[in-house]
Image (spheres, coloured by chain):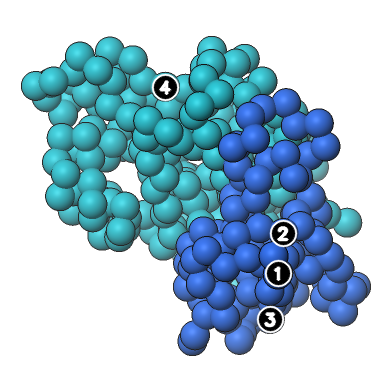
Chain colours: A blue, B cyan
C-alpha cells in the first residue's frame, strides 16, 4: 500500500474525528497533538487500525503509520527548554492532512 | 472513557507482551490464598478459557515465567554489541528484529524502533496513553514509567524530568521525546562512554542501565 506522505512533508493532525470518536473510544492519537502541525520524520509502513481492533474488528484496511515530529515550543505554551527540542508521536495516516507553509 | 491502562491496541501482533501489567508480585497469580476480587475474576476467566480450549493448561503461567525471565541485561547486551560492531549497529537500526534474532533474542512480534543518542540529539521514551514498553527486550517496566507524573511530565518538561534523574544536558543538545503511542516499541541506543576503548562486550554491557535505554540516564565509564 502506498503512503500518502513522505519524510519531510509538512502535515497537520486532524483536530477532531467525531465519526471515529463516538462510540469508539480507543484512539491512539494523543489530544495534545490534535490540530498541530508537524513534519513527517519517517514512514513506518502499514499496520492494522487500532480503532477497529479495539472494537473487536479486524482493523482492516491497514493504515500507514508515521512518526511525526513537532517542535516542543509549538506544543506547549511557555515550554522551558531550548527552541530546538522536539517531540515525536506515531500517527496513523487517516489522522493526517497536508499542511502548507 | 480513555482507559489509561494496557489493552487492546496491540491486538493482532503481540498480544499484550509489551503492556504494563506488573507481574512482579510475590504470590503467583494462581495462589489460592490470593483472593482479591480481581484475582478471583482472573482465575475464573482463565479456567473458562482453558475449558473452552482457548488457552492450554499452564499457558498463562508459562508466559508469566517467560516475561519474568527477561531483564534489561538482554537490552544491554544488544547495546554493547552495537557499540563494538558497526555492521551489527547498522542492522539493528534498519531491521531490529532480525538483528536481535542474530543474538538469539526473540522479540515475539514486537516492532522495535531504535533511536540513537548522538552529539546533537538525546532521545527519551514515554507512553502518554498507557505504558507501552519494549518488554520482550527489557522486561517489566519500572513503576515510575507507568506513573501519571512521568507520563505527563516527560512530554511537557522533559529537561526537568531528566534533571531529576541526574541528567543535565546543554541547550545545544536537542532533547527528542518519543511518545510511544501506537505500534512501535522504542529502544534508546545510548552513546558509548569515552574511555572505554578496547573494552569487551561484557564489560561494556555492564555500563548499560535500564534507564539509559529509556533515555532517562546516560551511561558512564
- Front in this rendered view, residue B219 or B78: B219
> Residue B73, how many percent across, how many down?
32, 31
The chain carrying label 4 is B
Which residue is the site of mark 1?
A: A99
Q: Say whether residue B210 is visible.
A: no
Mark 3 lies on residue = A57
Q: Percent x, y for residue B9?
A: 64, 63
Kindly report which numbered mark, 1 or 4, lies closer to the viewer in this rendering: 1
Determine the CA span between mark 3 and mark 2: 30 Å
Q: Please indicate, yes or no, whether residue B92 appears anywhere in the rendered image.
A: yes
Real-space CA distance between mark 1 and mark 4, rounded to the nearest whole angstrom? 36 Å
Q: Where is residue B65 in the image (x, y as percent from the top left)?
A: 42, 42
Disc 1 crowd, CA 10 A, few/some/many (<14, 14-19, 20+): some
User: Is B87 left, or right, of B97 in this rendering?
Assistant: left
Q: In this view, does B81 lie to the left or right of B155?
A: left
Helix, strand or loop at disc 2?
Answer: strand
Query: Quadrant location of the C terminus of chain A?
Result: bottom right
Label 3 or label 1, whichever lies nearer to me, is 1
Q: Residue A59 carries which label?
A: none
* Residue receiving disc 4: B218
Circle 2: is it few (<14), some (14-19), or many (20+) Cα within 10 Å? Answer: many
Amino acid at each position: 500500500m502506498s503512503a500518502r506522505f513522505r519524510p519531510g512533508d509538512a502535515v497537520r493532525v486532524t483536530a477532531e474525528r467525531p465519526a471515529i470518536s463516538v462510540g469508539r473510544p480507543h484512539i491512539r492519537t494523543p489530544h495534545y497533538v490534535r490540530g498541530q502541525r508537524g513534519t513527517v520524520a519517517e514512514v513506518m509502513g502499514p499496520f492494522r487500525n487500532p480503532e477497529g481492533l479495539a472494537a473487536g474488528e479486524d482493523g482492516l484496511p491497514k493504515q500507514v503509520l508515521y512518526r511525526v515530529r513537532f517542535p516542543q515550543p509549538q506544543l506547549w505554551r511557555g515550554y522551558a527548554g531550548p527552541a530546538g527540542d522536539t517531540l515525536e508521536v506515531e500517527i496513523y495516516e487517516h489522522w493526517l492532512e497536508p499542511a502548507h507553509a | 472513557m480513555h482507559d489509561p491502562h494496557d489493552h487492546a491496541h496491540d491486538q493482532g501482533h503481540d498480544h499484550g507482551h509489551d503492556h504494563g501489567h506488573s507481574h512482579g508480585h510475590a504470590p503467583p497469580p494462581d495462589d489460592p490464598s490470593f483472593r482479591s476480587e480481581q484475582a478471583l475474576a482472573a482465575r475464573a476467566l482463565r479456567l473458562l478459557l482453558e475449558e473452552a480450549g482457548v488457552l492450554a493448561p499452564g499457558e498463562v503461567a508459562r508466559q508469566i515465567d517467560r516475561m519474568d525471565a527477561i531483564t534489561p541485561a538482554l537490552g544491554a547486551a544488544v547495546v554493547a554489541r552495537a557499540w563494538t560492531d558497526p555492521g551489527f549497529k547498522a542492522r539493528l537500526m534498519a531491521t531490529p528484529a532480525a538483528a536481535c534474532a542474530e543474538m538469539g533474542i526473540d522479540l515475539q512480534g514486537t516492532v522495535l524502533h531504535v533511536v540513537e543518542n548522538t552529539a546533537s540529539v538525546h532521545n527519551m521514551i514515554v507512553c502518554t496513553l498507557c505504558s507501552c514498553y519494549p518488554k520482550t527486550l527489557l522486561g517489566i517496566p519500572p513503576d515510575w514509567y507507568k506513573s501519571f507524573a512521568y507520563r505527563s511530565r516527560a512530554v511537557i518538561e522533559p529537561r526537568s524530568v531528566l534533571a531529576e534523574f541526574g541528567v543535565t544536558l546543554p541547550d545545544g543538545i536537542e532533547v527528542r521525546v518519543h511518545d510511544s503511542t501506537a505500534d512501535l516499541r522504542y529502544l534508546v541506543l545510548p552513546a558509548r562512554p569515552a574511555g572505554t576503548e578496547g573494552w569487551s562486550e561484557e564489560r561494556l554491557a555492564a555500563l548499560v542501565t535500564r534507564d539509559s535505554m529509556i533515555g532517562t540516564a546516560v551511561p558512564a565509564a
